[in-house]
Image: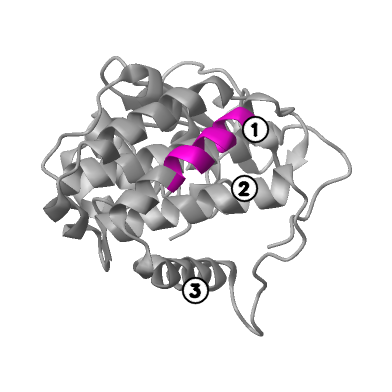
Amino acid sequence: MTAQWNEVPGTPSWLGSPIDARPLFAPEQAALMTTLRGLEPADWRQEAVPGWTVRDLVAHLLGDFYGRLGRDRDGHPDGPAFAPGETLEEVIHRINQEWVDACRRISAAALTDTVDLVGGQVARFFATTDPDRPSLGVSWAGADPAPLWLDSARDFTEFWTHRQQIRRATGQDTDPNPRFLSVVLDTFLRALPHTLRHTTAPPGTQLQVHIGGPAGGTWTATVIEGRWSLAEPATGRPAARVGLDAESAWRLCTRGISPAAAFAGARVDGDRQLAEAACQIVSIVY
């Protein structure tokens, strides 16, 4: 799809401080290759996400790699387009499925080698980018266009999440490396103001989400000038505070668990209705 870029670069104020995921693409790619080269033949047939096997999900990753390079590195103009009446979610799901279907003739070994080659190019591309320039919109953060730092961090979270889905499908736990997971969680929580956009509260109202563990932290959303923002410092006692463990948090944001399940397991203080609204957070096109 053709990027719609803003002529005025900058970070929308509600997003908070920029994230620099660029140095992590190369080690994430290395971790992915270690995972793929350790799979047994039967592992490739395991269901990784509903409707897709591990092999399908790896093919999807390859399509993401090619799309990023073609669009942003090479200026390739002939990407997929919207069909009449399609929403963003519909076109993304359609083109993803078309790609996966076309790749079913490719063997697991050939996919692995190609992912190694092209994924390495993606990591090298991101290392050279200007994080402040305008780029593709990030719909779940309400930023369109978005600064490249958010667009690239979004890609990093997608690559990391798909690797975890492969691990879980093949009997492995989530990679606990806080170097990766802390950036994933920080990126996912940038969806919080957009999640709360229909939740009204008096000016100055604050909601905190706290995620425990070495990769966690605390994110404070504040009502400023009629919208929720992550740019304001925490002051006093928030109207609501939601505590989640890191595993529940990343799976909630990618709909690996439901909002109801996350809320049931959360530690909630203060306004429960506001806390429940925060647990509707989703940080993928869903």
Name which residue type carries label 2: Arg
Q: Position of residue 228 (x, y in %)?
A: 58, 39
Relative horizontal placement of residue 251, taking residue 135 as reference (left or right): left
Furthest residue in direction bottom, as rendered: 84
Would you name the residue on which mark 1 appears?
125
| Residue 229 within the segment the image draws in magenta | no
Query: Whole-Å distance between the Cαs marked 3 and 2?
Result: 18 Å
**Mark 1 and mark 2: span between their CA atoms?**
9 Å
Residue receiving disc 3: 94
- The amino acid sitting under disc 3 is Arg
Mark number, residue 68? 2
Tell me where residue 224 appears, x and y as whole percent.
65, 34
How much space separates mark 1 and mark 3, taking CA atoms? Answer: 27 Å
> Do the numbered discs 1 and 3 sit on residues whose CB atoms are within 8 Å?
no
Q: Nearer the viewer, residue 33 or 275?
A: 33
| Magenta region | 114-125
N-terminal of the two: label 1 or label 3? 3
* Residue 253 can be seen in this image: no
| Residue at 30% from the left image edge and 20% from the top image edge | 177
Nearest to N terminus: mark 1 or mark 2: 2
Name the residue located 62 percent from the left edge and 22 percent from the top edge.
17
Residue at the image point whose x is 40% and y is 72% from the top: 101
Camera sees residue 41: yes
